[in-house]
Image (tube, rainbow, N blue to C red):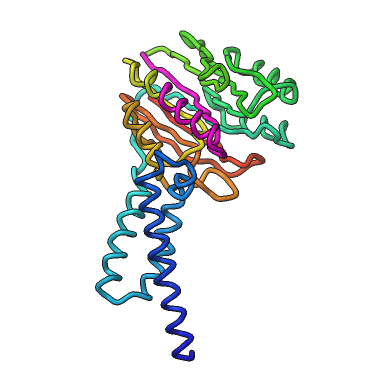
Amino acid sequence: MNPKIRTAILKRLRFYSLCLLVLLVLAQVLALFWYPLEWFSHFSLHGSLFILLASFAFKRRYRYILWAICAGVIVWAFLPLSGSLKNEQVMKIIAYNIYFENKEKDKEIDFLFNQNADILALTEMGGLAWQSQLSVLQQHYPYSCGHSIDSPFAMQLFSKQKPLSCEVHFIEDVYPYIQAVFSHQKTLFVLHPPPPVNGELANERLLYFQKTAQKIAAQNNAVLVVGDLNNTPFSPIYRRFKRNSGLQDAMYKALPTWKPFFLPLDRVLYRQSNVKAKALSWQYSDHRAIEILWQ
């Protein structure tokens, strides 16, 4: 390669790498104050991988610094490892953003039945387009509660065993969440805050996290929180929600659950219990279903 071209390429790589590093750092510092910066925080792992590859354009001493930074992000992204369960009764839960405009509704229902779960926690399910599928599920899961509306904020919870209570609550009278209490002092929350695609929805999502974190933190029971959080563990807003609600992640932070950008938007968090969770294969939604074992 022509030395001048090679030098120009290396300079470009160094420049773009440093710009990306500064942008990712600013996203962590200022995302709480300006929502567009938070978008970049979700791509911290992607950016770290790029910087890691581009680090060979730097002198050795700077390369080692970049390696240390990127390695820290990558290792953190793949924690925690899967939890362990005791030899006790386990509840199997499928949490799934089934996609409100899903064109293969009946196939998705067959997929859900094949999982043989005790509980189904479904977001973006409800409204007129889902009535026949809702009635089919109710035949196999006799206990249910939810918010059936022609909107992506529809949600449903189906259970084979009778919960002590199952209630739908609303943030700002618009955005629902489900709170279900089961025997053995277990409380399940199903969340689906709005996506922060503009300033108004970003503020609504902040309020959603604030209010639900207060409710979750006030629980004395063992708690499980599932749903499409429209957020990732790389965001300081997510970490503040987790800290304020006293929860911890059940899945490693880099697990992609949403297309097309393969971000880990679907989360499982817990407190005072044993949990194992994994993402299932892609079906017909833009999200992956999550299988959770809870005891």
Q: Of 276 and 88, which appears nearest the observer?
A: 276
Name the residue at the top extreme. 164
Residue 290 at what x, y percent from top left?
51, 36
Residue occupying the far left of the picture:
61
Q: Quadrant of residue 124?
A: top right
- Seen at 46% across and 88% down, the residue is 4
Q: Residue 16: where, in percent of width, then height? A: 44, 67
Q: Specify start and end residues of the magenta stretch as a single range.
A: 185-212
Q: Is residue 77 placed above or below 275 in the rendered structure?
A: below
Query: 133 and 243: which one is in front?
Result: 243
Which residue occupies 41% across, 43% down? 31
Position of residue 130 measured from the top left corner of the image (x, y, whole percent): 71, 24
Q: Quadrant of residue 133?
A: top right
**Residue for point 46% across, 32% down:** 292
Taking depth in this image into account, of 141 and 121 the one nearest to the observer is 121
Quarter holding residue 194:
top right
Instruction: Give x and y (percent) for residue 275.
Output: 38, 31
Q: Quadrant of the C terminus?
A: top left
Q: Is residue 86 visible?
A: no
Q: Is residue 202 magenta?
A: yes
